[in-house]
Amino acid sequence: MNKLTENKCSCGFDESNKKWVMPVCEYSGIGWLLYFIGISAKPVKVKFKCQKCGDEFGETTDEETLKRYVGR
C-alpha cells in the first residue's frame, strides 16, 4: 500500500538505524484492546522517530513492514 513517506531525519538517520531511530506503532481500537490484554496485534501505521534530534521523519502502512512490528 503505502511505503515510507520520507527517508531521513535531520541527523541523516533512516529507519534502519536501530540505535537512534525508534518505531512508534499506532493501533486500531481493537488492536489496543488485544495489546492491553496481552495478545500481539498488528499496528495500522508505524511512524519513525529519531531519539537524537526528535524528528518524526517517516510513516508507513505497507503490509509487509507492519508485519515486522507485530507486538511492539
Image (tube, rainbow, N blue to C red):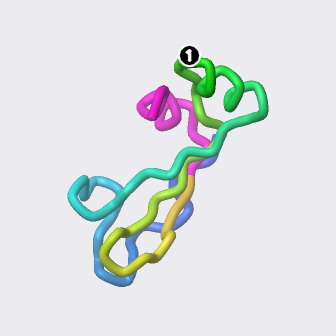
Residue 10 located left or right of residue 3: left
Q: Start and end of the magenta stretch?
A: 60-72
Quadrant the C terminus occupies: top left
Q: Give above or below for 19 relative to 46.
A: below
> What residue lies at 78% left-to-right and 33% top-to-bottom?
29
> What residue lies at 51% left-to-right and 63% top-to-bottom?
58
> What residue lies at 35% left-to-right and 56% top-to-bottom?
15
> What residue lies at 56% left-to-right and 62% top-to-bottom?
5
Q: In this figure, which residue is indicated by the disc labeled 1?
A: 39
68 drawn magenta: yes
Q: Can residue 29 be seen by looking at this rendering? A: yes
Q: Position of residue 27 (x, y in %)?
A: 66, 38
Q: Can residue 3 be seen by looking at this rendering? A: no
Name which quarter of the figure residue 12 lies in: bottom left
Name which quarter of the figure residue 11 lies in: bottom left
Badge 1 amino acid? Ile
Q: Give above or below for 32 relative to 4.
A: above
Quadrant the N terminus occupies: top right
66 drawn magenta: yes
Q: Position of residue 36 (x, y in %)?
A: 62, 27
The front one of 69 and 63 is 69
Q: Give above or below for 21 relative to 45.
A: below
